[in-house]
Amino acid sequence: MLQQSPISFQMATKNVLIVDGNEAMQNMRASVLRSHGVHVHLAKSVSEAKLLWVPDFFDLVLLDMRQRSK
């Protein structure tokens, strides 16, 4: 029987929003999180993230602080 890692078990059903204009970095982060069962949502800018925002829905937001606001 395949056992889930403690991290995967704790992260399953979590919703994470990744805000990053760098598509390669965004995809790498999303891939790692998805491998742990996380539901990943992607935005390329803060403006796009605002359109996706739903109060009390996301458990974590990963934001590239160096990106320019669009």
Image (cartoon, rainbow, N blue to C red):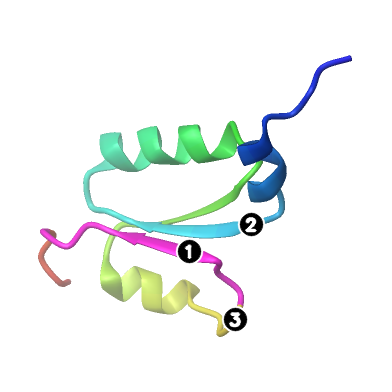
Majority secondary structure of magenta residues: loop
Of callouts 1 and 2, which one flags the residue occurring earlier in the amino acid sequence?
A: 2
- Mark linked to residue 60: 1
Residue depicted at 48% across the width and 72% down the height: 52
Amino acid type indicated by mark 1: Leu
Magenta span of residues? 57-66
Q: Is residue 54 magenta?
A: no
Where disc 3 sits, the SS reads loop
- At numbered mark 1, what does the secondary structure look like: helix, strand or loop? strand
Q: CA distance from mark 3 to mark 1?
A: 10 Å
Q: Amino acid at mark 2?
A: Lys
Q: Are marks 1 and 2 in contact (CB under 8 Å)?
A: yes
For image coordinates 10% across by 59% down, the residue present is 66
Q: Residue at x 59, y 31 (%)?
A: 35
Query: Mark 3 or mark 2: which comes first in sequence?
Result: 2
Quadrant the C terminus occupies:
bottom left
Cα distance in 3D space between marks 3 and 2: 12 Å
* Residue annotated with mark 3: 56
Q: Residue furthest right?
A: 1
Q: Residues within 10 Å of mark 3 (few under 14, many from 20)?
A: few
Marks 1 and 2, Cα distance to the nearest angstrom?
Answer: 8 Å
Percent across and percent down for residue 28 are: 37, 33
Asked if residue 35 is positioned above or below residue 18 in the image, the reply reads above
Q: Secondary structure at mark 2?
A: loop
Residue with the mark numbered 2: 14
Direction from residue 16 to residue 26 in the image, left or right: left
Q: Is residue 65 above or below residue 2?
A: below
4 over 2 or under it: above or below:
below
Q: Amino acid at mark 3?
A: Asp
